Amino acid sequence: MEESRLENVPIEIQLNIVYHLPDIASLYTLVHASSRYHTTYLPARGFVLSQVLARELGPYALFDAGKTAEALTLPKKHEDDGEQLRHFLNKYKDSVPHYYTTDKVDKLQLDFLVLMAQLQSTVRFVAQGFLGSALSHRSVKNKIIDEPKPISHRELERIYRAFYRFEFFLPSLPSAPLCTFATIC
């Protein structure tokens, strides 16, 4: 079996390709489809994950993704009656600015970046379902739009951000469900 030309490029170019992928889904697909790209990816995993997450989410949604991952890693203490969650939410509200710069993302631990990537895979899936449903029923002045325009990357970032905020504010509600979309992954 002859290897593809993409497989035969030098490692430096493979790393550059992996580094410039637009989203976590593309990264996952490439490194699981090609053992060579997987081997190239592993030593630079943390850096690549941080850069792809930053590119896919943008600085504001990336901040909320990080705070959601942080909230999910809080130890579960049932006896404090939500005090820990209130403290976390107050700390979130006091965080200025509400965005991550790429140099801040580069300093995150690998296991935390992996958790953020897993969260983003779930959020992306949920957002696609939401968008498919919401856009299929759009109308302008009582006229149904046959072919809606695709949403911009900025609009998609805002939708991701809304899902992340929903995820970490949900436990603060008095009758919050036990299962949220992040617990699915």
Image (cartoon, rainbow, N blue to C red):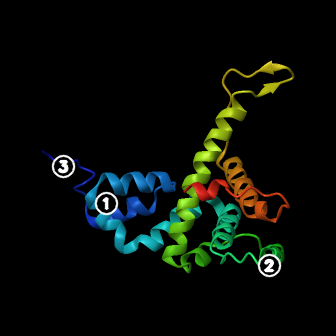
- Which element type, helix, strand or loop, lies under badge 2? helix
Question: Residue 25's spot in the image, x, y percent?
Answer: 48, 52
- The quarter of the rendered structure image containing the C terminus is bottom right
Q: Where residue 170 is drawn, which disc sits there?
A: none
Residue 3 is marked as 3
Distance of label 3 from label 1 (alpha carbons): 13 Å
Image height check: is 108 above or below 36?
Answer: below
Discs 2, 1 touching: Cβ within 8 Å: no
Q: Are marks 3 and 1 in contact (CB under 8 Å)?
A: no
Q: Which residue is mark 1?
A: 37
What residue appears at the point 61 percent right and 59 percent down from the top-left corner?
Answer: 183
Instruction: Reply above or below: 23 against 96.
Output: above
Kindly state the secondary structure of the residue where label 1 is placed. Answer: helix
| Quarter of the image where one finds residue 179 | bottom right
* Mark 3 / mark 1, whichever is N-terminal: 3
Marks 2 and 3, Cα distance to the nearest angstrom? Answer: 52 Å
* Residue at 71 percent of width and 78 percent of height: 77
Q: Which residue type carries mark 1?
A: Tyr
Count of numbered marks:
3
Query: Could you say where residue 134 lies in the image, as x and y percent from the top left?
Result: 72, 34
Dot 3 crowding, Cα within 10 Å, few <14, some 14–19, many 20+: few
Q: Nearer the viewer, mark 2 or mark 1?
A: 2
- Left or right: residue 16 versus residue 78 is left
Q: Quadrant of the N terminus?
A: top left
SS assignment at label 3: loop
The residue that label 2 is drawn on is 91
Q: CA distance from mark 2 to mark 1?
A: 40 Å
Disc nearest the viewer among 2 and 3: 2
Quadrant of the image occupied by residue 90: bottom right
Instruction: Give the class, few, some or many, for how many residues have Cα within 10 Å of label 2's Cα (few <14, many ≥20).
Output: few
Give, as a three-letter code, the residue at label 2.
Lys
- Residue 23, image x and y in percent? 52, 54
